Amino acid sequence: MKRKTDVLIVGGSAAGVTTAITVRRHYPDAEITLARKENQVLIPCGIPYIFGTVGSPENNLIPDAVLSKNNIDLITDEVTSIDRKGKAVTTASGDAISYKKMVLATGSVPFVPPIPDTRLNNVFTVKKEVDYLKHMSQALDKAKDLVIIGGGFIGVEFADECRKRQNLNVSVIELLPHCLLLACDEDICSKAEDKLKENGVNILADTRAEAIVGNGKVEHVQLAGGEKLRADAVIMGIGVVPNSDLAQSADLKVDERHSIYVDEFMRTSDENIFAAGDCARKTSFFTGGPSRLMLASIASIESRVAGANLFTLRRRNERSIGVFSTVIDDLCIGSAGMTERMARETGFDVVTGEASSPNRHPVGMPGVTDVSVKLIFSKESGIMIGGQICGGPSVGEAINIIGATIQKRMRADDIATLQVGTHPALTASPIAYQITNAAEIALTKMR
Amino acid sequence: MKRKTDVLIVGGSAAGVTTAITVRRHYPDAEITLARKENQVLIPCGIPYIFGTVGSPENNLIPDAVLSKNNIDLITDEVTSIDRKGKAVTTASGDAISYKKMVLATGSVPFVPPIPDTRLNNVFTVKKEVDYLKHMSQALDKAKDLVIIGGGFIGVEFADECRKRQNLNVSVIELLPHCLLLACDEDICSKAEDKLKENGVNILADTRAEAIVGNGKVEHVQLAGGEKLRADAVIMGIGVVPNSDLAQSADLKVDERHSIYVDEFMRTSDENIFAAGDCARKTSFFTGGPSRLMLASIASIESRVAGANLFTLRRRNERSIGVFSTVIDDLCIGSAGMTERMARETGFDVVTGEASSPNRHPVGMPGVTDVSVKLIFSKESGIMIGGQICGGPSVGEAINIIGATIQKRMRADDIATLQVGTHPALTASPIAYQITNAAEIALTKMR
């Protein structure tokens, strides 16, 4: 079958859906088609919660209603090749779709480490596929010893959810000295590790998995020191790589990491083809160099840029800051921008400020917990380049205050006098408000 | 007794304490003295919670440890006069204290409406005095019918806390068409009113209290239409007026509302005397004209400006935005900057954007509730001039994202592409994130 559309979006996850909505808002009359290969699309960040809190992949789907509500034509089919000259694609089922503008939102695939033998039964990656995750959940039901390779966000979230299953002993193997060390400084990493340990998770940091060993099915993970860790299930959560096969087969420019090259308007090397999300090249807000950040939230922002720019250039991608949050048991953690460690390694001279206080005032108010904030400033300019928070659930929004102030390149002095609102039942007192106080403390060190 | 100090701070509430800490941070060697007349200082925003959640004034105190920790000398005595030429004050107990720099943080006192007969027994204002509030709480224990005059934040918070007392029928009288109308637009005001009504509070909006009537003790409140509302206790919560008596007696310049004149460095008309908090003149961030906002959070920011500037001018007061939050039962409300109504009345041509979505993703995550955001932009410039949120407890921090973006004069386009972080257990999905979406929706109306 031959089809025609004004805008073809390839991929139906965070980037694809946000692009579709954004195009609809900016070009209300455009005919918009979204092609994806999956029948059902998982909420990517929600995948660990399938294994505990929400219970099944079907409870973690992006509803298709968001597409129909925005008058987006949905095609469930895989785009297999692009004819850039003819401005058309062909699909696995043999259809042809011609487009005026196309957006590649093909996402990423799990990185599989080059160790033996990752193909044993019960060795899993974190694939964004409903049936795969169902199978994985069934396997975990029968398992006793789960080893998670990789202690980043996905690894610790899997650990925290899986330890809620009665049947499982959970271990996490992390190559770096601490879990979460690419996103947080050591003190917060330690708090997260302590929380996992309290709940029975075995943390092996500074540890390399050398091999996965078994006979048909995994039996143990062999560590660098020779030690064997019993395992009847393994989850590898050590990152993802851009899925740029389609782009590469169409001779679109990619970088050395196979990310699709995009300019600041999110245009690929073909001006009629845009890319957004995990498949697209990212640049660090702080260094201008390449960034390895791949987050659904970044995908959404890039999609708001790409979608607005399709027929008229309206927005620039301001480069990626990286704003994360997560929860381990009742400990909520947020991080934005560079960690102190990362900033120093990059060559910045930094000053930090830390403030900790209860998130309610007076402390007799319900829901009280301590919230700690650490802010990282370039000493030279006073500009904030990073921040971390840990505490209660409001951390999820509080980290976005820090993200916004980083994005606007605010200085310690601006942040110390930021006009914030406070309330006894919702925040720290204005005297003890953590973000302004941390900035004030950093300032005193700059003199 | 004669004393000497480098810095004398008069007043021990939000402004006084924040000033003291700020001076200590910026001038580590200064001798700092804080003089206040109260033995114990109440957390001002926590006062309504004394009557329900926290149970007593003693559970709602600013701890003196914050002063001793920062090496601030505390004098419990009332400053009764200022000798500006001699740079000294005298106190009620007859002491004299000489200063190099002084900060007036004398706060505000409740406004008493000019109606008969506010001096009857069991007619209360919201005084920041421990013994007064204890007496008030005892009176409420014995009362049956409580009438609250004034449906602003303080009024609705008192209503929500007092309705938790088994013995009380609570009514709120509000002059404007809705409660909270000076801080929120009608739709949010209605939600707040509905929540109070659901919990048995009687709301009389668009209603004027003409007189308080009784024989020694209050018996009823007479309304403008002639109706009588039975009352054996009345709380008047219709705002506060600056407490500038001391400043006026020292011939410091005040404005027509008796606010102490301060320049943008928080200096009064005497360059050795600063003022901060409710007693100091405020200017609107949006109009440059006078502002009636009096909030502990504003007091704290002004104190961070004043405290830093005492011996060297380091900061400017950027004028008051007004960032509020409150909770009524389980409904959390935040507002920053101008409401749509206020903006139109001021003469702005405005465009609004609204977005509502669950605060978790997927919706099976615990703690899910809808969060609604309304953003208000100047149509001409695209600059955001206000925002309101209602939803769950994270509203307390989310409104500070909006406050920060207002303070940095961000445009709808900047906010639509703000780099936010999201997490299944803490926020909306990146696709549905309310603040960015509301900005995007407003943008589509600007074309």
Image (cartoon, coloured by chain):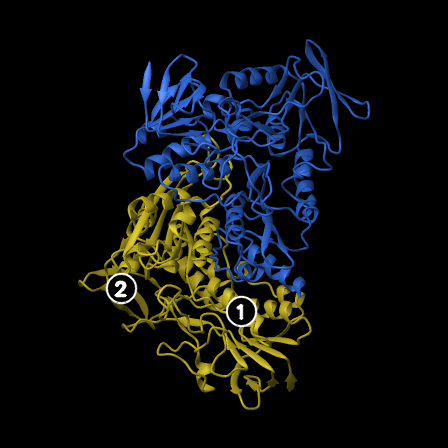
Chain colours: A yellow, B blue
Q: Amino acid at mark 2?
A: Val
| Secondary-structure class at tag 1 | loop
Gap between marks 2 and 1, in whole Å?
48 Å
Q: Where is the N terminus of chain B found, in terms of image quarters?
A: top left
**Residue at x 42%, y 57% (from the top left corner):** A409
The disc, 2 or 1, on the residue closer to the chain's N-terminal end is 2
Chain bearing mark 2 = A
- Residue A340, how many percent across, how many down? 30, 55
Residue receiving disc 1: A315
Q: Amino acid at mark 1?
A: Arg
- Label 1 near label 2: C-beta < 8 Å? no
Residue receiving disc 2: A221
| Secondary-structure class at tag 2 | strand
Q: Nearer the viewer, mark 2 or mark 1?
A: 1
- Residue B246, how many percent across, how many down? 49, 22
Q: Is residue A310 above or below residue B76?
A: below
- Residue A213, how many percent across, how many down? 27, 68
From the viewer's side, name the closer residue of A401 and A194: A401
**Residue at x 62%, y 41% (from the top left corner):** B183
Q: Quadrant for residue A282, please give it.
A: bottom left
Q: Where is the C terminus of chain B found, in terms of image quarters?
A: bottom right
